[in-house]
Image (spheres, rainbow, N blue to C red):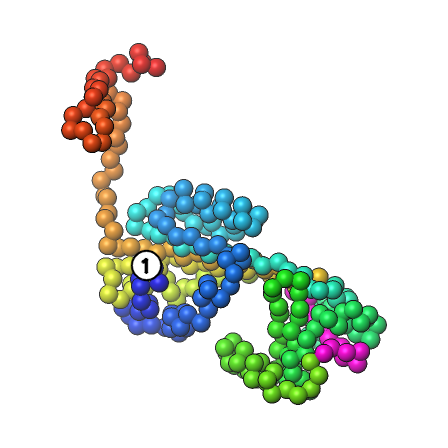
Amino acid sequence: DNEIKRPIEFEEGNNKTVTDLNKQDFKKDYIDESGYYIKCGTICPELQEEIKNSIKTKFNVTSSILSSINFTYNPLLKFFYAILKKDFHFLEKFDPLENDIFGDNEEDDVEYFGIDSNSTSELYQNVTVLFYSEDDYAVKLNTKSNDEILLYRTNKMKNFNEHFLDINNKTKEYNGSKDFNYSDSIKIPKFHFSAEASFEDLEDKIIKNTDGIKIFKTIETLKFKMDECGVELLSEAGLVMYYGSAPCFDEQRSFDFDKPFVMFLKEKDKQVPYFAMYVAEAKKLQ
């Protein structure tokens, strides 16, 4: 939005990834600023240091992607960075349940948590029923923070927007009890994983109606944990943009004042210096 100021179009034509991203289904306004940090600037060591210090101060975390970027100063490159961090706990700690399979894989030995017939009624407040039928149901998991988790079980294959719309519509239509009660049960798999991805179908493609601007490198990481206590989420994304229209300095210049030179001192609003010195032997001045 700030750099190109319009939807991205590649000179060679758009692919599905850039078309989907141009829809901007999610914007930063949809989340409180306390959960994210963003920064962009020309590639240089100072930018790397600023990002490292900022996320350490705000979230007490160390980046997993900054080390993969070369931050040697380059006026042709800009780095765009975003991090999302969320930690929250359920109202009450769920009970650990027996390991079980997941899906049709008989070899699975998955850890689960939730509520069964042996659980106390205190745990019921963790769950709000949204709607229920035998193979199509959804619940909301309540937390101590402003965050909530929606779990939707369905056999239908749709995109995220369509699933979310289904949840809202079916919740409105459901006439059953929204309270979790003693005859109900819930079983949720534990998650503890990390992943890293790049988006090669966005890279090295010149953006239409620019002077050679293109996305040079992309990287995204995800760390996610959910257990009987709550959720920990950490996601980082980085994008390096190449600006072909920026000035290119082929000649390396070394401004070394290691031979006799002249120095002047002047005030900004004056036309002549108030002090001048010819430096012939620096050693005498040290």
Compare residues 218 and 164 and report the one nearer the observer. 164
Q: Mark 1 sits on what residue? A: 3
Looking at the image, which residue sits at the far right? Answer: 118
* Image coords of residue 277 (percent x, y): 22, 18
Residue 169 highlighted magenta (yes or no): no
- 131 vs 4, left or right, is right
Q: Residue at x 24, y 65 (%)?
A: 209
Q: Eyeballing the image, is 69 above or below 263?
A: below
Quadrant of the rendering where the N terminus is positioned: bottom left
Residue 125 found in image quarter:
bottom right
Q: Which residue is drawn at 46% across and 63% down?
A: 28
Q: Residue at x 66, y 76 (%)?
A: 139
Q: Can residue 236 be seen in this view?
A: no
* Image coords of residue 229 (percent x, y): 71, 61
Q: Residue at x 38, y 65 (%)?
A: 202
The residue type indicated by label 1 comes to Glu
Q: Is mark 1 on a helix, strand or loop?
A: loop
Looking at the image, which residue sits at the far left? Answer: 271
Residue 187 found in image quarter:
bottom right
Mark 1 neighbour density, 10 Å: few (under 14) some (14–19) many (20 or more) = few
Q: What stretch is highlighted in magenta?
A: 179-191
Q: Is residue 238 visible?
A: yes
How many numbered marks have been drawn onto this rendered protein structure?
Answer: 1
- 102 vs 282, left or right, is right
